[in-house]
Image: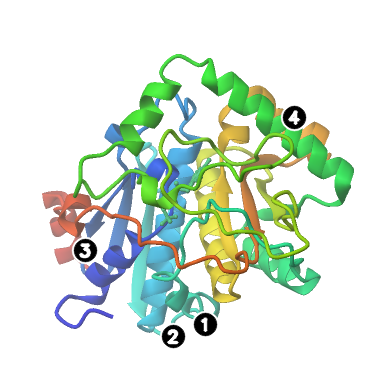
Amino acid sequence: MHDAVSPEVAAAQYALRAPSVHNTQPWRWRIGHDRIELYADRNRHLAATDPDRRDLVISCGAALHHLAVALAATGRTVEITRMPDPEDSGHLATVHISPGPGDPEDAALFRAITRRRTDRRRLSHRPVPHSMIEALVAQAARLGAHLVPVTGDAMRRRLADTLARAAEEQAATPGYTAELHLWTGRYAGSGDGVSAASVAARPPGLLGPSALRSFPRSQLAQPIPPPGHGPSDDAAEFLVVTTTADTVEDRIRAGEATSAVLLAATALGLATTPLSQGVEIDATRHAIGTKVLHVPEQPQLVLRVGWPATNAGELPPTPRRALRSVLDPIRPRDTDHRSTR
Ligand SMILES: Cc1cc2nc3c(=O)[nH]c(=O)nc-3n(C[C@H](O)[C@H](O)[C@H](O)COP(=O)(O)O)c2cc1C
């Protein structure tokens, strides 16, 4: 942890490592002496890609859980109130902080924060053990969401078809391509966006559509399959984060669960890729629930999880905004409130 700053400021710094749609990091924090408030940054909303702000809120939920993990690792107890202010829909959560003990299951995920990356390359042909999938399902449940594994060839095919349909629809959505170019062609040092160094081109010889989002620029090398294996020989598992309802609070919880699942998978040595195209289009999101998974719950995000391919090199670190860009001063009424306690 950082020595020179308070644990709360250090936790906000670690929270910047959270995954976010197109690496927009659409959150802001207000740090008080016994609590931290989380706000959505609507200036960073992707209007064409994410019309109902699902990705934006899930990204904020992931940052919220990263913050809780960092606080747990310094022995702080946190209690989270989601959507605390009926007058302010952008105020997503208030984290109340008190001296320890920190939640041990969250604290155990701390070291994965700086190691986790989104891996967009072909994954290994080695299957993910069932016990690991069960551990990830338990992580999502702990954070108040469900993680539904996509099992069997027929279900996998239905998911692949649905994701391909979402990609086709988005390609024809006004503004989608412009947004993609904007967030993948950031100026050097911008601290956000998806750089070409983190994107691999479609593996040559892959049969059928790719489940991954297609980005305009790619510089990341695809690992060569080992002898006896082809490019389609990829044992990645697909898992869908779902929630019982679809309120903003459910989406925050989906983001927290996504963070826990990705960090736990990283700690197990697995590679992970969040895939949101299927949930960005109403019709395909509905189809993922009713026609792919056959569950009554609300699909929030698709996750790809698998072993990194043999000979896959380490992924480059992804850029982040400066901490000062995501911190807001405490408002005067907050200071008054604190002085009366
Ligand atoms: C809600 C959400 C949606 C995302 N959707 C996609 C996606 O469709 N395709 C993809 O390659 N990455 C997706 N990502 C991953 C982000 O692009 C990634 O987290 C970001 O670029 C930061 O990189 P990092 O995860 O390596 O730290 C998504 C992440 C979140 C939280």
Res 312 seen here: yes
Compute the Cα span from label 3 to label 2.
20 Å
> Which mark sits nearer the N-terminus, 2 or 4?
2
Q: Secondary structure at mark 1?
A: helix
Q: Are marks 1 and 2 in contact (CB under 8 Å)?
A: yes
Q: Secondary structure at mark 4?
A: helix
Label drawn at residue 101: 2
Label 3 Cα crowd, 10 Å radius (few <14 / some 14-19 / many 20+):
some
Say which of 114 and 41 sits in front: 114
Discs 3/1, front: 1
Q: Where does the image place residue 114, in percent across and percent down from the top left? A: 39, 70
> Which mark sits nearer the N-terminus, 1 or 4?
1
Res 295 seen here: no
Label 4 Cα crowd, 10 Å radius (few <14 / some 14-19 / many 20+):
some
Label 1 Cα crowd, 10 Å radius (few <14 / some 14-19 / many 20+):
few
Q: Quadrant of the N terminus?
A: bottom left
Say which of 323 and 253 sits in front: 323
Badge 1 is on which residue?
104
Inspect the image, locate mark 4, and give the three-letter code of the amino acid beneath it: Ala
Badge 3 is on which residue?
32
Q: Where does the image place residue 310, in percent across and percent down from the top left? A: 62, 68
Compute the Cα span from label 3 to label 1.
24 Å
Q: How is the image coloured?
A: rainbow
Discs 2/4, front: 4
In the image, is the residue at mark 4 within 8 Å of ligand 1 by its beta carbon? no
Label drawn at residue 287: 4
> Which mark sits nearer the N-terminus, 3 or 2?
3
